[in-house]
């Protein structure tokens, strides 16, 4: 495919993110994109963000759990760049108007102390490269209208990234049981979804190895200090239709995610931007 066509798709997605107006899926309007071409669209927009003063601070894997694939009609994982401007501070307010149709996820986040690069990366390599793990919330969002996505659509859209919040309870991975750690997501104190880290390809370390190997043909190397999000341990929850039991819908929404025996991460959606359907 010509570079001009890829840049055209990238521009349309970048404008949708900026304006908050979603577009029809590129897979339905053309030009046809395969997974590698879609990743090139993603990279074009990541490079444009860096040129505008942003910074690549890691990578993410999405739709790795079967519950997530079923929810969004996909049969393969997606992946994307993590940019510094997508990170929010724990306990602070996140403006709902930043997003089009956001969902909330709970997942572990890994911070690296060593380089990782595929192909042929093993789980042992991943274990050796991780400095510590933290609980993380990812807000996923799509620039594609009605989340009507196929794999090339979400890849072109940077893995449907929205925002990332990292928790403040770092742990060495030797102190965690990442193959069996229950997690739960709450909105205004009410539990809205549960899951387990085993849902992330058996354990999130294996998912990280998969991601690094998948990106190796694109020349991507994970670097010390970068954040790797290996995927949600539970089905993503729509931000706008969660706490239906509330009678006062003008109140702020308080979100928290907790891993048993590990720690929590939380954020607020202020009342002025908290909406429900």
Image (cartoon, rainbow, N blue to C red):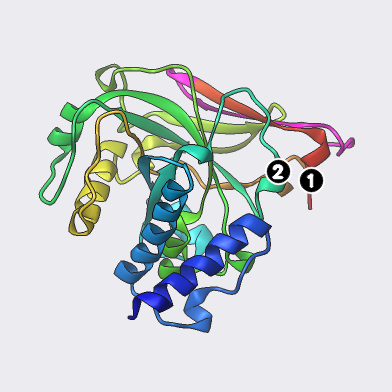
Task: Give x and y (percent) for residue 189.
Answer: 69, 26
Residue 1 or residue 61, whichever sits in front: 1
Q: Earlier in the sequence, mark 1 or mark 2?
A: 2
Residue drawn at x 52%, y 81% as measured from the top left? 28
- In contact (CB < 8 Å): disc 1 and disc 2: yes
Instruction: Determine the secondary structure under disc 2.
Output: helix
Q: Residue at x 13, y 41 (%)?
A: 122
Image quadrant where one finds the N terminus: bottom left
Residue under pointer 1: 275
Q: Which mark is residue 260?
A: none
Regarding residue 69, the answer to whether it shows in the image is yes
* Disc 1, SS: loop
Magenta part of the chain = 246-263
Image quarter of residue 176? top left
Q: CA distance from mark 1 to mark 2?
A: 8 Å
Q: State the image quarter where residue 35 is shown.
A: bottom left
Residues packed near mark 2 inside 10 Å, few (<14), some (14 to 19) or many (20 plus) = some
The label nearer to you, 1 versus 2, is 2
Is 116 left, or right, of 107 in this rendering?
Answer: left
> Circle 2 sits on which residue?
96
Say if the magenta span includes residue 165.
Answer: no
> In front here: 75 or 116?
116
């Amino acid at each position: 495919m010509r570079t001009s066509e890829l840049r055209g798709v990238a521009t349309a997605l970048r404008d949708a993110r900026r304006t908050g107006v979603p577009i029809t899926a590129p897979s339905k309007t053309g030009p046809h994109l395969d997974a590698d071409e879609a990743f090139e669209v993603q990279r074009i927009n990541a490079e444009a963000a860096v040129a505008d003063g942003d910074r690549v601070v890691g990578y993410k894997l999405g739709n790795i759990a079967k519950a997530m694939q079923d929810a969004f009609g996909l049969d393969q994982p997606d992946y994307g760049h993590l940019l510094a401007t997508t990170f929010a501070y724990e306990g602070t307010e996140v403006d709902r108007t930043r997003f089009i149709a956001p969902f909330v996820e709970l997942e572990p986040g890994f911070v690296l102390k060593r380089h990782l690069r595929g192909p042929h990366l093993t789980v042992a390599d991943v274990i050796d490269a991780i400095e510590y793990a933290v609980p993380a919330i990812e807000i996923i969002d799509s620039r594609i209208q009605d989340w009507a996505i196929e794999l090339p659509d979400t890849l072109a859209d940077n893995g449907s990234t929205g925002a990332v919040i990292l928790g403040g309870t770092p742990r060495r991975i030797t102190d965690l049981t990442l193959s069996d750690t229950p997690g739960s997501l709450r909105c205004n104190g009410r539990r809205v979804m549960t899951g387990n880290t085993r849902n992330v390809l058996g354990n999130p370390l294996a998912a990280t190895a998969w991601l690094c190997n998948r990106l190796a043909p694109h020349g991507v190397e994970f670097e010390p200090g970068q954040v790797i999000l290996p995927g949600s341990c539970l089905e993503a929850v729509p931000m706008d239709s969660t706490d239906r039991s509330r009678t006062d819908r003008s109140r702020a929404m308080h979100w928290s995610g907790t891993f048993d025996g590990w720690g929590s991460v939380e954020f607020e959606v202020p009342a002025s931007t908290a909406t429900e359907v």
